[in-house]
Amino acid sequence: MGILAWILGFIPGIAWLIYVYRKDIYEPEPLVWVLGLFALGAAIVYPVGMIEKAMMTGMGIENTANVVDAAKVSWFIAGFVEELAKFSVVMMVVAYRKTFNEPMDGIVYASAVALGFASVENVIYIGRFGAPVILFRAPLATLGHMLFSSLWG
C-alpha cells in the first residue's frame, strides 16, 4: 500500500473529526487528547481484527462469502467487538478525567476513537479493493463508525 492509500483512507476521518471538534463550542476538549484518542483508535484495528478472526473461527465461519455468514460477522462479531474496543479506550484513557464533565465530551472522544479506527479500516479496504472503494466507505462506513460510537459516547 502506498502513501496514496493512507491519504485517501484518512481524509474522511480527519474531515469528520474536524467537524465534531468544532461542535464542542462551550468547553472544547484539549486537542492533544482528541488527537491522541484518534491515534489510539487507529492503533486498535489490528488487535480487534485478530479477536474478530478468532471469534469467526470459533463460530465456524471461514469467510463471509455468503449472506448469512456476512450477517453473523457484521451483527454479532464486528459490531460487538469493535464498539467494545472503542468504548474501552475511552473508558481507560479519558472517562475519569476531571475535564470530562459534559455529554459533548463523550461524543467528541468517542468520535475521535471511532474515526481513527475507521481511517485505518479505510486504508485496509483500499489496499484490498482499490482506491474507488473510498467513495462508498467515506460517507457510509466512516460516518457509521462515528455515529455508532457517538451513541455510547
Image (cartoon, rainbow, N blue to C red):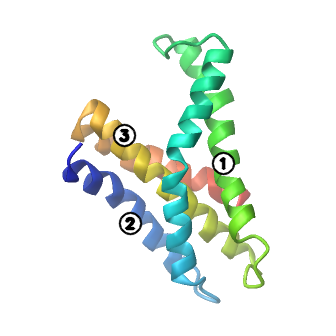
Give the left or right position of residue 134, taking residue 65 as reference.
Answer: left
Residue 34 position, x and y percent, is 55, 73
Q: Residue at x 69, y 68 (%)?
A: 93
Mark 3–mark 2 CB contact (< 8 Å): no
Q: Is 120 drawn above or below residue 100 in the view shown? A: above
Task: Work out how far the residue at label 3 is from the one at label 2, CA to CA, in angstroms.
Answer: 19 Å
Q: Is residue 109 visible?
A: yes
Q: Residue at x 63, y 54 (%)?
A: 149
- Look at the image and tell me in which quarter the N terminus lies: top left
Task: Please name which of the two marks, 2 or 1, marks the residue nearer to the observer.
Answer: 1
Task: Work out how far the residue at label 2 is from the one at label 1, CA to CA, in angstroms.
Answer: 23 Å
Classify mark 2: helix, strand or loop: helix
Q: Residue at x 63, y 10 (%)?
A: 60
Task: Work out how far the residue at label 3 is from the one at label 1, CA to CA, in angstroms.
Answer: 18 Å
Classify mark 3: helix, strand or loop: helix
Circle number at residue 85? 1
Residue 10 position, x and y percent, is 35, 57
Task: Please name which of the two marks, 3 or 2, marks the residue nearer to the observer.
Answer: 3
The numbered mark, 3 or 1, whose residue comes first in the sequence reads 1
Mark 2–mark 1 CB contact (< 8 Å): no
Q: Count neighbours of disc 1 (C-alpha within 10 A) and say few if under 14, some if 14 to 19, many if 20 or more.
A: some
Q: To which residue does mark 3 refer?
A: 124
- Look at the image and tell me in which quarter the C terminus lies: bottom right
**Mark 3: amino acid:** Ile
Circle number at residue 5? none
Q: Of residues 108 and 81, which is closer to you in this image? A: 81
Circle number at residue 15? 2
Classify mark 1: helix, strand or loop: helix
Q: Is residue 72 visible?
A: no
